[in-house]
Image (cartoon, rainbow, N blue to C red):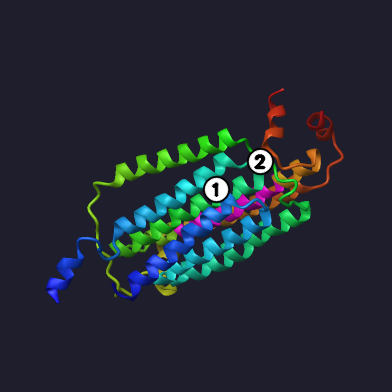
């Protein structure tokens, strides 16, 4: 068991534990913090696999920007464990059973896959130079389209979140 | 040395693609469970993010295993789309909260009337 394997097991244990914390904690703020921890552990997996570009993007975009957005919205709404809606015990049990059954089915589907070993020494795949060359050589069009997507998402978020005084209000409230 | 390795193979094998498959499936199933168990719209949204990340992790693992950089760019584009999705989705949730003063998804039942 070398250092790669030890780090893999450590990070995997923390990842799964924090993912369980996300769905089990009553307080939404704790859920967000557990999710940040999960994303940081997944970033740890990326750095373990030497995907340095995705490591820093995951850390900045996911754990930084997106989760702060979630935290900001939750604090804006002043949610806490007192006002947290809970499903009934039976529905929760049904959710756990369905998730577990899905896990078993997926596991059975990939069980016969031949395990492929990891080349722990390869260095250059995930470096920013290599990825940048591929991105701007083969994926220029999707890259530009994603910028249009961002623009439309930004406009959409502003339009949806705008304080409205039009006729939409009367239809939804009743 | 070889004897030790052979003796250990019974209960331990070095990390390979199966380990990453198992971890990714576990995270995905936890996300599904959270989506089914909770009523808070924001938590459900976070569970969807968790599922997206489990897929990302598997893509990066296979990119590493097979030495292919394309998979990592797919992960990059998934992150881009997820960021746009979060912006719009949270705007919708904020607007829903402004209308009904709750993020309980059961309130959305009234959409069918």
Residue at the extreme right: A165
Label at residue A86: 2
Q: Quadrant of residue A31?
A: bottom right
Residue B82 on the magenta segment: yes
How far is the residue under mark 2 from the one under mark 1?
A: 19 Å
Q: Nearer the viewer, residue B72 or B41?
A: B41
Residue drawn at the location 13% of the way across and 73% of the way down: B2
Write down the region rendered in magenta: B75-92
| Rendering coords of residue B54 (x, y %) | 45, 54
The chain ID associated with circle 2 is A
Residue at point 32% right, 62% down? B68
**Disc 2 and disc 1 in contact, CB within 8 angstroms:** no
- Residue B27, above or below A89: below
Q: Residue furthest left?
A: B3
* A65 or B68, nearer to the observer: A65
Image quadrant where one finds the N terminus of chain A: bottom left
Number of marks in the rendered image: 2
Q: Which numbered dot is residue A2?
A: none
- Mark 1 lies on residue: B48
Prevailing secondary structure of the magenta residues = helix
**Callout 1: chain:** B
Residue in front for this viewpoint, A130 or B42:
B42
Relative horizontal placement of residue B10, taking residue B38 as reference (left or right): left
Left or right: where B82 falls relative to B109: left
Can residue A143 be seen in this snapshot? no
Residue A16 vs residue A62: left or right?
left
Residue B96 image point, x, y percent: 74, 41
Q: Is residue B94 above or below residue A5?
A: above
Helix, strand or loop at mark 1: helix
- In the rendered structure, does residue A6 fall within the stretch colored magenta? no
């Amino acid at each position: 068991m070398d250092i790669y394997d030890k780090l893999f097991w450590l990070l995997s244990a923390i990842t799964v534990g924090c993912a369980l914390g996300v769905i089990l904690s009553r307080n939404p703020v704790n859920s967000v913090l557990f999710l940040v921890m999960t994303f940081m552990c997944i970033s740890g997996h990326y750095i373990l696999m030497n995907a340095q570009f995705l490591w820093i993007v995951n850390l900045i975009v996911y754990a930084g920007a997106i989760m702060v957005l979630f935290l900001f919205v939750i604090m804006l709404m002043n949610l806490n464990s007192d006002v947290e809606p809970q499903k009934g015990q039976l529905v929760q049990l049904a959710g756990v059973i369905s998730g577990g059954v899905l896990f078993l089915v997926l596991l059975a589907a990939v069980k016969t896959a031949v395990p492929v070993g990891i080349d722990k020494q390869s260095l250059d795949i995930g470096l920013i130079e290599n990825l940048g060359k591929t991105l701007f050589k083969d994926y220029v069009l999707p890259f530009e389209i994603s910028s249009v997507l961002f623009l439309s998402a930004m406009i959409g978020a502003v339009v949806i979140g705008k304080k409205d005084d039009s006729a939409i209000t009367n239809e939804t409230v009743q | 040395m070889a004897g030790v390795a052979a003796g250990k193979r019974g209960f331990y094998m070095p990390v390979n693609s199966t380990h990453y498959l198992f971890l990714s499936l576990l995270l995905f199933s936890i996300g599904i469970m959270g989506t089914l168990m909770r009523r808070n719209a924001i938590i459900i949204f976070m569970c969807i993010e968790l599922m997206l990340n489990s897929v990302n992790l598997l893509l990066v693992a296979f990119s590493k295993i097979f030495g292919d950089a394309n998979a990592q760019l797919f992960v990059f584009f998934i992150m881009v789309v997820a960021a746009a999705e979060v912006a719009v989705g949270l705007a919708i949730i904020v607007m829903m909260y402004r209308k009904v003063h709750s993020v309980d998804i059961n309130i959305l039942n009234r959409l069918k009337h």
